[in-house]
Image (tube, rainbow, N blue to C red):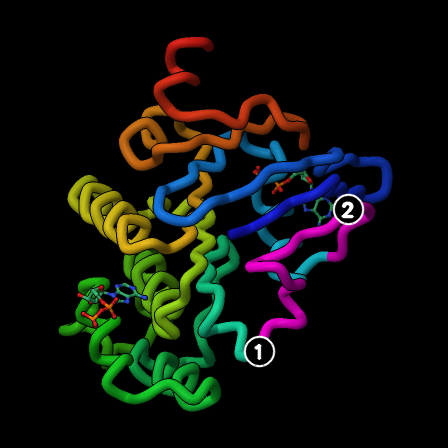
């Protein structure tokens, strides 16, 4: 479970996140919907302690991210920032992540397979397409088999087949009891992926409701 309580973030004169409160519950996909610039990425970065709130707080399963023991095993995250992993291959990158987090080698093969990179995992990530980069980011997020997943615009760069695949994966992960927050600026995408919606604009909460209710009311 993720609890966001009165969260705010200002960058100079810009209010990116404005007194936001909501809860992300396990066992269903929660869509984090809002136009570009609404504050979704900033909120997710604050959930991961990558950005400091100007006010308010976030708790993940009752704790601050920085207080989690072996966070990669508690929270898997796919963010928008992309790196080339120092010229390493996808497999090397995942092996390194696994080693530094006490995760067994078998899990590397499992996640490469799970994200459809079994045959391309040996290639340097520098030559990866955007979609392959997203798949690798997802593999890294899944590596620790975490009960909480934060995915920021995960369909970016995926082809139509990949988008359908991702939707099924995300729904399956939630159905297994995980807490899953997926951001998107597309209502059409969220309607097909999420059961619950947290909708924001200009950093403020617009709706916190089921997809069905949101479609009926707005
Ligand atoms: P979204 O993910 O919904 O597209 P963001 O969280 O990226 O929105 O951005 C929210 C607002 O905060 C935007 O106005 C954006 O320009 C601003 N912003 C985000 N990150 C920074 C930053 N590091 N410095 C200054 N402004 C930022
Ligand atoms: P078990 O391994 O005992 O069957 P799990 O809950 O570990 O139970 O896994 C059930 C299914 O969910 C497996 O098919 C596995 O591939 C998948 N799975 C488990 N953990 C993850 C994860 N973090 N990300 C994606 N799929 C997972």
Secondary structure category for the residue under label 2: strand
Image quadrant of ligand 2 equals: bottom left
Secondary structure category for the residue under label 1: loop
Please report the residue visible at 35 percent of the width from the left and 35 percent of the height from the top.
194
Q: Residues within 10 Å of mark 2 (few under 14, many from 20)?
A: some
- Residue under label 2: 56
Whether 70 is drawn above or below 168: the answer is: below
Question: Would residue 181 appear left or right of 171 to someone viewing this image?
Answer: right
Residue furthest right in the image: 13
Q: What mark, if any, has residue 69 been given in the picture?
A: 1
Q: Magenta span has 127?
A: no
Q: Position of residue 103 (x, y in %)?
A: 37, 85
User: Which portion, as a residue range, is magenta?
Assistant: 52-68
Whether 154 is drawn above or below 206: the answer is: below
Q: Magenta span has 54?
A: yes
Label 1 – label 2 distance at C-alpha: 22 Å
Q: Position of residue 92 (x, y in %)?
A: 34, 85
């Amino acid at each position: 479970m993720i609890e966001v309580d009165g969260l705010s973030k200002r960058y100079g004169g810009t209010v990116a996140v404005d007194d936001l409160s909501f809860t992300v519950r396990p066992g269903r996909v929660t869509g984090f919907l809002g136009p570009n610039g609404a504050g979704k990425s900033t909120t997710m970065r604050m959930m991961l302690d990558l950005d400091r709130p100007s006010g308010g707080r976030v708790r993940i399963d009752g704790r601050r991210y920085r207080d989690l023991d072996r966070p990669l095993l508690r929270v898997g995250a796919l963010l928008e920032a992309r790196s080339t992993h120092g010229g390493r291959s996808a497999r090397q990158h995942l092996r390194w992540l696994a080693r530094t987090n006490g995760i067994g080698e078998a899990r590397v093969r499992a996640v490469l397979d799970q994200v459809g990179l079994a045959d391309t995992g040996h290639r340097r990530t520098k030559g990866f397409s955007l979609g392959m980069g997203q798949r690798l980011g997802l593999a890294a997020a899944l590596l620790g088999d975490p009960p909480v997943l934060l995915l920021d615009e995960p369909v970016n760069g995926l082809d139509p087949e990949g988008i359908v695949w991702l939707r099924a994966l995300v729904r399956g992960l939630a159905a297994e009891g995980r807490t899953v927050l997926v951001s998107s600026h597309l209502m059409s995408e969220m309607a097909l992926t999420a059961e619950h919606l947290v909708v924001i604009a200009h950093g403020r909460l617009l709706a916190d409701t089921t997809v069905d209710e949101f479609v009926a009311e707005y």
